[in-house]
Amino acid sequence: MIIMQKNPDDLAVDPATPRRLADHPTAIAARARGPAVAEPLTLAAVRALALAAGADDAGVVALDHPDLAEEVPHVRRAMADARSLVAIVVRMHPDNVQSPQRSVANVEFHRASHDVDEIAHKLAVALAARGHRAINPAMAFPMEMAEFPGRTWVVSHKRVAVAAQLGRMGLHRSVIHPRFGSFIVLGTVITSAAIAGETAPLTYDPCVSCKLCVAACPVGAIEPDGAFRFSACYDHNYREFMTGFGDFVEEVADSKDRHELRRRVSQSETASMWQSLAFRPSYKAAYCLAVCPAGEDIIGRFLRDRAGHLRDTVKPLTERVETVYVVAGSDAQAHVAKRFPHKHVRVVRSSLRPASARAFFRAIPLTFQRGPARGWKATFHFDLAGADAVQATVRIDDGQLAVQDGLVGDADIVVRTDGNVWLEIATKVRNPVLAVLTGKLKVRGDRALLGKFAACFPR
Ligand code: B12
Ligand code: SF4
């Protein structure tokens, strides 16, 4: 078939419409208005716009800031001509966030999250009115779910806020603002504008190293050395989001009748899941933010009456009788049993299921459990072939994990198979013993290490 190329200026469909684009009423009106002149912008002017839109604080950083190098491809995917980022801070009302009744805390999380999206939208529109392209990616939800379980967020608001000198990453891996402390949510406006001026550097770390976040987290997600146990937080706090909901659906699918479902899932859990779907999902904890005394506006009570802070804020959360969602064999399960025996453990399946063998090796730092990895060390070579081919070296050394591309150094065990077969074994779809017996999985070296490896990534 031959497609005739029409004259691009020949737009007329309706005989009353001029045939040439230049004669179109829209083009004539636009010419009369003249070309849009982009207003030069300064940090002070943009900050004032953000505050007028409702932000409690705001800062600006150029996209080529060295600390944002990892963000650049993601930001450019959302806006090809992005040049600057405006970081927005919205404060939360601490009393709500600290309430042991988590529905009260959740009202505030959602209120502030909604506000940050509104404020970022207003700012984006204000920048566009000044002749600069500008977009406001979501505060956190919804995100680019086609990428799930990979990186679903367009821009890391934490990284932008820190680079814009609005705060520093606390021990609990959330940003602490020097005044508002941990009681903030963040937003980012991405713009094509070059913005003159730089925010003055924040010269101190607002975190006061009290480690109350470590003590309060029901699943031990925050370690005293600053390590963050991603899967522990995700499996519990996010039970009613994303994959927690997926696991709930699997419980329904696996139950042979309503009686079995009732044995597997309590009435209150089903009701809570429905409330989350119908209204908004509820975070189960966020105790790390609730107990944090950092920030000029927050620390007063802690300085005056530390025992009072522990009694009235920390203990009502740590002593709370509640359900804690953990994966069998995880560090979180051991943590609840040891630190919070009065809390009820509910065993769930791991929420992060890699989509490919390649993604498996990228994701294992997020699901690695230090407990089962203590007291031994080994180097694993994975030589996976096929459409999902990947070579990786994994070292486990007394609770530490290191993953490298390629087959590096000497291995205690070499695993050879097809990438898809490995993915099925890793996600418990295929039995590894049968895979060995049928020759699908070839293992050279100490086979017992495979079981030890699996224990470090419980599902
Ligand atoms: C992914 C994410 C999470 C993850 C990981 C948390 C984390 N520490 O990064 C989970 C689901 C566990 C989570 C939990 C919470 N989050 Co959150 N979350 C995000 C999100 C979408 C991106 C975070 C990010 O920038 N990561 C990249 C780097 C900079 O972070 P990092 O700390 O170095 O990396 C850790 C994780 O991101 C993870 N990780 C790293 N790479 C990858 C890749 C993939 C594919 C995955 C899945 C994870 C992952 O592992 C790292 C180490 O453990 C942002 C929204 C956004 N668009 O920015 C909100 C955000 C960070 N969350 C926020 C909040 C409030 C929470 C909760 C308090 C929610 C609640 N109400 O309970 C908890 C707090 C948990 C904690 N102590 O951090 C706020 C933080 C505000 C602040 N003061 O800094 C943000 C900025 C949302 C917002 N707009 O305000 N969150
Ligand atoms: S609770 Fe204490 S240690 Fe944890 S982030 Fe806040 S100030 Fe830092």
Image (cartoon, rainbow, N blue to C red):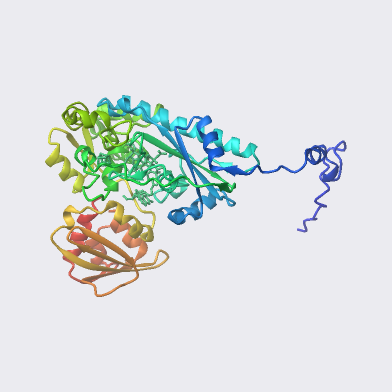
In front of the other: 306 or 313: 306
Q: In this view, does 356 lie to the left or right of 302?
A: right
Q: Where is residue 262 in the image (x, y as percent from the top left)?
A: 24, 30
Q: Is residue 372 left or right of residue 42?
A: left
Q: In this view, does 229 lie to the left or right of 183?
A: left
In front of the other: 65 or 265: 65
Q: Where is residue 253 in the image (x, y as percent from the top left)?
A: 32, 39
Q: In this view, does 136 lie above or below 149?
A: above
Asked if residue 267 can be seen in this view, the reply is yes
Q: In this view, does 343 lie above or below 147?
A: above
Q: In this view, does 89 lie above or below 61?
A: above
Quarter occupied by residue 92: top left
Number of marks: 0
Q: Where is residue 430 in the image (x, y as percent from the top left)?
A: 28, 57
Quarter occupied by residue 423: bottom left
In front of the other: 131 or 242: 131
Q: In which quarter of the image is ligand 1?
A: top left
In front of the other: 163 or 369: 163
Q: Is residue 332 left or right of residue 152?
A: left
Q: Position of residue 401 (x, y in %)?
A: 25, 60
Quarter occupied by residue 421: bottom left
Quadrant where the N terminus is found in the figure: bottom right
Asked if residue 263 can be seen in this view, the reply is no
